[in-house]
Image (tube, rainbow, N blue to C red):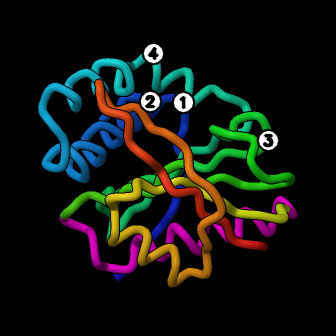
């Protein structure tokens, strides 16, 4: 199995938008109401919103391929691009998403390890992320990686206020 990670380029914006929407829906549509998913999707997955995220200084999108097939993506944020200012000199993993067909094949581990290396190269003191408090599988994975809970924040999905657990790792 050959896993490769490439930084997404501006001419791949449509592909970035498609993978963001598809992986999010695969992961969470069945756990939420159709109305809330539709409301969230109408804002979060527009071409304009993705372009805004893509052009934000300090945000980085990466595609991950397994044996030449697109398997998922990663979004990292530094400095003012972070979704919250919670830790000094930190790198945020905003998203690690893998297509269902590629899950449980160590791709998420590869992306996490890549993120840690990215943080080390930037001489970050912390790596942090937010994970939905109902996503037990992800919380378990991040705990195994050495992250610990340090706070929470709200996440609005349609009409529903959800809670993300904030987890951190000293680099």
Say if the magenta span includes residue 45.
no
The residue labelled by disc 2 is 13
Quadrant where the N terminus is found in the figure: bottom left
Q: Residue at x 79, y 53 (%)?
A: 87
Q: Earlier in the sequence, mark 2 or mark 4?
A: 2
Query: Which is nearer the N-term, disc 3 or disc 2?
Result: 2
Residue for point 79% across, 41% down: 79
Q: Is residue 160 above or below residue 149?
A: above
Q: Residue 115 vs residue 62: left or right?
A: right
Question: Badge 4 is on which residue?
Answer: 48
Q: Earlier in the sequence, mark 3 or mark 4?
A: 4
The answer to whether the residue labelled 2 contacts the one labelled 1, judged by CB atoms less than 8 Å apart, is yes
Give the vertical position of 75 relative to 11 (above or below): below
Quadrant where the image shows the C terminus: bottom right
| Residue 26 higher or lower than 45, as above or below | below
- What separation in Å lies between label 3 and label 2 (alpha carbons)? 23 Å
Q: CA distance from mark 1 to mark 4?
A: 13 Å
Q: Which residue is mark 1?
A: 10
To which residue does mark 3 refer? 79
* Label 4 crowd (10 A; few <14 / some 14-19 / many >=20): few
Whether 102 is among the magenta residues is yes
Tell me the CA gap for discs 2 and 1. 6 Å
- What secondary structure prevails in the magenta region? helix
**SS class, disc 2:** helix
């Amino acid at each position: 199995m050959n896993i490769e990670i490439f930084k997404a380029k501006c001419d791949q914006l449509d592909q970035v938008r498609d993978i963001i929407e598809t992986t999010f829906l695969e992961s969470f549509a069945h756990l939420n109401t159709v109305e809330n998913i539709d409301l969230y999707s109408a804002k979060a997955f527009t071409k304009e919103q993705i372009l805004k995220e893509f052009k934000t200084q300090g945000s980085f999108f990466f595609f991950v391929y397994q044996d030449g097939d697109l398997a998922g993506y990663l979004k990292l944020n530094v400095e003012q691009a972070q979704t919250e200012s919670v830790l000094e000199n930190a790198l945020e993993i905003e998203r690690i998403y893998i297509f269902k067909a590629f899950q449980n094949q160590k791709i998420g581990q590869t992306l996490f390890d890549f993120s840690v290396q990215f943080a080390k190269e930037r001489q970050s003191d912390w790596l942090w992320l937010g994970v939905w408090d109902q996503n037990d599988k992800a919380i378990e994975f991040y705990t195994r990686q050495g992250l610990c809970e340090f706070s929470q924040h709200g996440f609005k999905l349609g009409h529903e206020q959800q809670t993300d657990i904030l987890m951190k790792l000293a680099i």
